[in-house]
Image (cartoon, rainbow, N blue to C red):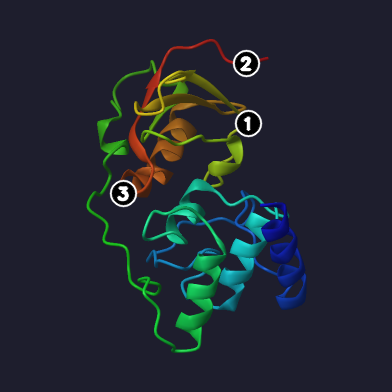
Amino acid sequence: MRFIKLISLVVAFILALGCVTVGAESFSVPEVLLFGDVDMDGVVTVKDATAIQKGIAELTYLTSVQRFLCDPDKTGVSIKNATGIQKCVADLDCELCFGEELAMDFYDKFSCEVNIGSTKYYTDAIVVVAKPGLELMLEDFPEFDFTSIERIGGLSDVTKPAQYLLYLENPSYDNVYQAIKTLDYRANIDLERVFVNSYTLPN
């Protein structure tokens, strides 16, 4: 494993150090999600292979959405994924479906459930229910400027959904609603449910 990480590190430096990183300051939900488009810029390029290599080498953090996009056969993020993208870019035969558009099954799945007439959402934390087997960190949510994350459920059984609290620095109805709305597309990827509830905000 250490040898693989070392190889990934070397290759990542050789290919490109300027790979686009998905971060809170520059992130916007792309209009189209493509398998293999790890940097989510709308096209599958060698930069996406480099992003995977950097992630494996732990130079950068691959978010849960990025991990989903670079692993269409759900076997785990590996050099195989980076090689597959390189084959796709070079128009060589690739057994993985890189370049194919991800079909989105839901629209406003989460935000449509927000009760606009209720004031109870003004100071509440956002509750995210992740699909089973996922470990999420604050870095997994670049769509919005969340300040902290706290896991509150699914600690012992990885076969069950895990719940997390996402906090905003200055929660209000407007930014709570907007934060939930930005997560709607993830109903197709890694989130089963998003809602708000009353919790004590962190210091």
- What is the CA distance from the residue labelled 2 to the residue labelled 3? 30 Å
Mark sitting earlier along the chain (2/3): 3
Answer above or below: position of 34 versus 92: above
Q: Please state which of residues 174 and 34 is positioned toward the viewer in this rendering.
A: 34
Residue 124 visible in the current orientation: no
Picture coordinates of residue 134 (x, y %)?
A: 45, 36
Instruction: Give the total of numbered labels.
Output: 3
Residue pictured at 35% horizontal, 71% vertical: 97
Res. 147 mark: 1
Which residue position holds label 2? 202
Picture coordinates of residue 31 (x, y %)?
A: 39, 64
Report if the CB atoms under discs 1 and 2 are less than 8 Å apart: yes
- What is the CA distance from the residue labelled 3 to the residue labelled 1? 24 Å
Report if the CB atoms under discs 3 and 1 are less than 8 Å apart: no
Which residue position holds label 3? 188
Picture coordinates of residue 30 (x, y %)?
A: 44, 62
Mark sitting earlier along the chain (1/2): 1
Give the class, few, some or many, for how many residues have Cα within 10 Å of label 3's Cα (few <14, many ≥20). Answer: some
> In the image as oriented, which residue stretches furthest toward the left?
105
Which residue type carries mark 3?
Answer: Asn
Query: Helix, strand or loop at disc 1?
Result: loop
Which residue type carries mark 1?
Answer: Thr
Image depth: mark 3 or mark 1 in front: 3
> In the image as oriented, which residue stretches furthest toward the bottom?
91
Q: Please state which of residues 150 and 115 is positioned toward the viewer in this rendering.
A: 150
Query: Helix, strand or loop at disc 2?
Result: loop
Residue 106 visible in the current orientation: yes
Image depth: mark 2 or mark 3 in front: 3
Answer above or below: position of 144 versus 167: below
